[in-house]
Image (cartoon, grey):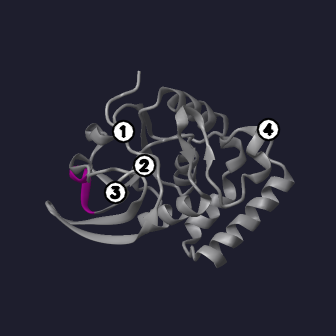
Amino acid sequence: MQDSFVHKGKRKNLVEYLRYRIGISDENVLSAMNDIPRHLFIESIFEDFAYEDRAFPILAHQTISHPSTVAEQSELLQVKAGEKVLEIGTGCGYQTAVLIAMKAHVYTVERQKDLFDFSKNKLRELHLYPKFQSFGDGFAGLPTFAPFDKIIVTCGAGTLPIELLKQLRVGGIMVIPLGPTDEQFLYRFTKVGPTEFEKEEFGAYKFVPMLGNTNQ
């Protein structure tokens, strides 16, 4: 698959939709989503619909999130160029690519081997390079590289992963969906002290569940 003028036109329309219908105002997010070819991260049978606000199945019974969800999570993260961002759940690599396009230094973890391999190859094809890409348990984070300026969790956790909060610097932000499998709420935690956090809620979403242990 190539990135044609038609794809670029559809991406431009998607960005206008995100700006005017969804209310995304962070130009860094909108610019990144205009740059990243979403159709290259999904199966070719869905290519014609890649720039609609829809989720699609990907490998390992997972999904690529709606573009609006990717944009909203990215905006809530308030990413600045050069910040260290830990992503839990690389998936197909689309959200990773958006964060890299936002000039973040991305450290990303995926527990499904099929998706780890796919995303690693896809990002390399597109000359997008995370600082570190790991196959492992997202609940554990990446303590070796901590502290992080920002943490984004792209799968729904039943309980708040305390280990991840420990890996956030004071002043840092974590965006995470929390709740049971059928419905999660999106939260933003701001670390205001070594063990103090401010918590904000941003409505109901559906994410694939966050899984512990490593799938060999």
**Upstream in sequence: badge 3 or badge 4:** 4
Q: Amino acid at mark 1?
A: Leu
Q: Residue 211's mark?
A: 1
Q: Is residue 121 above or below residue 178?
A: above
The residue identified by callout 3 is 179
- Residue mark closest to the camera, 3 vs 4: 3
Query: Judging from the image, what secondary structure is the residue with disc 3 in?
Result: loop
Between the residue at mark 2 and the residue at mark 4, the CA separation in whole angstroms equals 28 Å
Query: Judging from the image, what secondary structure is the residue with disc 4 in?
Result: loop
Query: Could you tell me which quadrant the C terminus lies in?
Result: top left
**Upstream in sequence: badge 1 or badge 2:** 2
- Residue mark closest to the camera, 3 vs 2: 3
Apparent side of residue 119 relative to residue 76 in the rendered image (left or right)? right
Q: Amino acid at mark 4?
A: Met
Query: Judging from the image, what secondary structure is the residue with disc 2 in?
Result: loop
The extreme right residue here reads 5
How many circles with numbers are drawn on the protein? Answer: 4
**Upstream in sequence: badge 3 or badge 2:** 2
The residue drawn where x is 74% and y is 60% is 11
Between the residue at mark 3 and the residue at mark 4, the CA separation in whole angstroms equals 37 Å
The residue identified by callout 2 is 155
Residue 78 showing in the rendered view: no
The residue drawn where x is 56% and y is 35% is 119
The residue identified by callout 4 is 1
Provide residue 134's location: percent of width, then percent of height. Answer: 41, 32
Q: Amino acid at mark 3?
A: Gly
**Upstream in sequence: badge 4 or badge 1:** 4
